[in-house]
Image: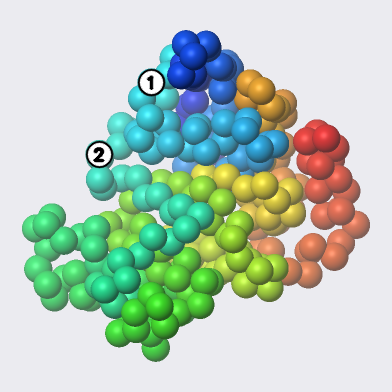
Amino acid sequence: MTSFLAVHSITKVYRTAQGNSVTALEDVSFEISDHEIIALIGPSGCGKSTLLRMIAGLDNSFTGQLNWAVPPKRGQDIGFVFQEPALLPWRTVLKNVGLGLEGKGHSKNQIKHRSLELIELVGLSDFADSYPSELSGGMRQRVAIARALAYNPRILLMDEPFGALDAITRDSLQNELLKIWEQTSKTIVIVTHSVEEAAYLADRVVVLSTHPGRIRAVHTVPFHRDRNSSIRKTPEFARFTGVLRSELE
């Protein structure tokens, strides 16, 4: 597969209020290939979200290198989905999705057309004129994903996007994300605490250790890409998630 981004020897050191040094990440290296889904898993506090913010360009105070095959353009090439959707409550679904396109030379008709395309992609065509308060948590997260895709980023970064949802909604949105990936071929990096979610969604799983975060293992997921929920019930899925879980313990 073609290299998209090489994360090379990333180390992140914080300074506490007392002047002490705390190493959050140490000598982290792995590669992300074009069009693949990478899952980052590890104990709480191992630096998963910090690493995602570095890739997004939101944190530049680290040593090491992010070697992009093609350097990203700020505000164009990187989409970010947070755990909380953070939608603007006074804007409709349509207006929230199109927010990132405003002020970038697009006409109102172009923004509307692109927004409606993405609203259809995430299965919310009947709710384009609804407000966030009128939507369920899962629907709001679908809007956040559509918003992140609006300007057609080359990579989509997702920080525990389904962590606050109930199990049924989470499973549904995982399937929705796979459908979106099949249709858009985006490169995706997702941070999750769930080994099942990592195994179900990803092509490869990067396992981080705790305090400081180091690469413990990188696993290629041993399942074909035409996945559906039935794979969760197979012995192979149980074995693979067991391996991931044992590395986290």
Judged left or right of residue 2, residue 153 is: left
Residue 96's tag is none
- Give the crowd class for mark 2: few <14, some 14-19, many >=20 residues within 10 Å: few
- Closer to the chain start, of discs 2 and 1, is 1
Image location (x, y in percent) of residue 140 = 45, 71
- Three-letter amino acid code of the residue under disc 1: Ser
Residue drawn at x 61%, y 66% as measured from the top left: 165
Q: Label 2 is placed on what type of residue?
A: Lys
Q: Quadrant of residue 114?
A: bottom left
Q: Which residue is rendered at x = 43% and y = 61% of the image? A: 85
Residue indicated by mark 2: 73
Residue placed farthest to the front in the image?
Answer: 18
The residue beneath circle 1 is 61
Q: Position of residue 133 (x, y in %)?
A: 40, 78
Quadrant of the drawing holding the C terminus: top right
Residue at the spot 47% in from the left edge and 66% down from the top edge: 141
Figure colour scheme: rainbow
SS label for mark 2 = loop
* Residue 28, image quadrant: top right
* CA distance for labels 2 and 1: 19 Å
Classify 102 as above or below 22: below
For the point 30% across and 62% down, the residue is: 150
Q: Where is residue 232? Give x, y as percent.
A: 79, 63
- Vertical arrangement, residue 166 with respect to residue 35, above or below: below
Q: Is residue 61 visible?
A: yes
